[in-house]
Image: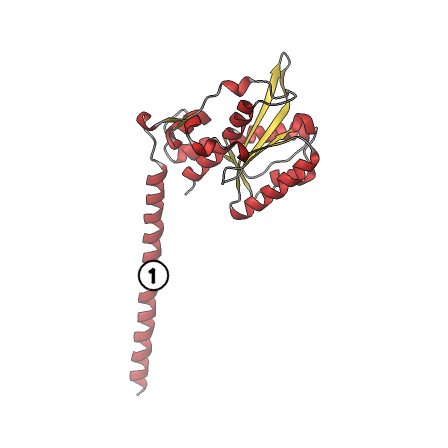
Amino acid sequence: MGDNNRRNEDFFTAAVLGAGALFGAYQVYKRYSSTDNASNNSNQTHSQSDWRDINEVQFYNRSHMNRVISNQNECKQAVKELRQACKEYPVLGLDCEWNNDSNGRRKVALLQLATQKGLCFLFRLCKIGYISEELKRILADPNIRKAGVGVETDMQYLLIDYQADGAGAVDLREMAEICDVPLPHNLASLAKQSLGIIMDKELQVSDWEADVLTENQIKYAANDARVAIELYKVYDY
């Protein structure tokens, strides 16, 4: 009777170990097969025949999704909406605009933050004069990623100009390199290759400290941040 019990225990132990091994093998297979699939999807690029002008794509041409923030009251509401958006998807597209003069770079005039649904807030720092504590907390939150090309440089300028610490920076150039996207890795090139859209960069050198921004400036600036988060979603796997 004791031998039968021992044999039953041995059989049970072997069965458990065997099941564990099979489960472990399945997990390894699942991990690597899903990684390969994601990598293959991320490495896809759009050929020139697929390119469309950004002005022809509805997602980038919804004026009601561009919010220009020029005072503290507007800033408070914007931060609340950004916080809410980041609860659903903790990533923001980030970009900055500034003027240059004979002495070099002037202070950052405009900070753009775009959510995954395409809503973009354009903070006119040259008009507000500072970055609020609520907005600083978002910029400094490491759990909210900020995606952009050269985003660490933008964050450095925000620190120098407005004493706003930044965290959670994700440089799209590094993501593109991991995904084997061909050079060059500037924003316009990545947008062509990975989103199939052509961006017009002429307004980059326009007057970002103007009393009133033109509709074209607003759309241009918002789309820089909007493209950034769309690229992040393509490369993230």
Q: Residue at coordinates 55% horizontally, 39% vertically from top-left?
A: 168
Which element carries disc 1, helix, strand or loop?
Answer: helix
Label 1 is placed on what type of residue? Phe
**Image location (x, y in percent) of residue 43:** 35, 36
The image quadrant where one finds the C terminus is top left
The image quadrant where one finds the N terminus is bottom left
Instruction: Please state which of residues 147 and 168 is positioned toward the viewer in this rendering.
Output: 147
Please name the residue that numbered disc 1 is placed on. 23
Residue 85: image quadrant is top right
Task: Specify whether residue 185 is in view.
Answer: no
Above or below, 210 relative to 28: above
In the picture, measured across the screen, residue 19 lies left or right of residue 120, that is: left
Question: Which class describes the residues within 10 Å of circle 1: few (<14), some (14-19), or many (20+)?
Answer: few
**Image location (x, y in percent) of residue 104:** 62, 16
Q: Residue at coordinates 52% horizontally, 48% vertically from top-left?
A: 88
Residue 8: image quadrant is bottom left
Above or below, 237 relative to 217: below
**Image location (x, y in percent) of residue 87:** 55, 48
Total numbered labels placed on residues in the image: 1
Residue with the most extreme top position: 102
Q: Residue at coordinates 45% horizontally, 30% vertically from top-left?
A: 173
Q: Residue at coordinates 39% horizontally, 32% vertically from top-left?
A: 195
In the picture, measured across the screen, residue 144 lies left or right of residue 72, that is: left
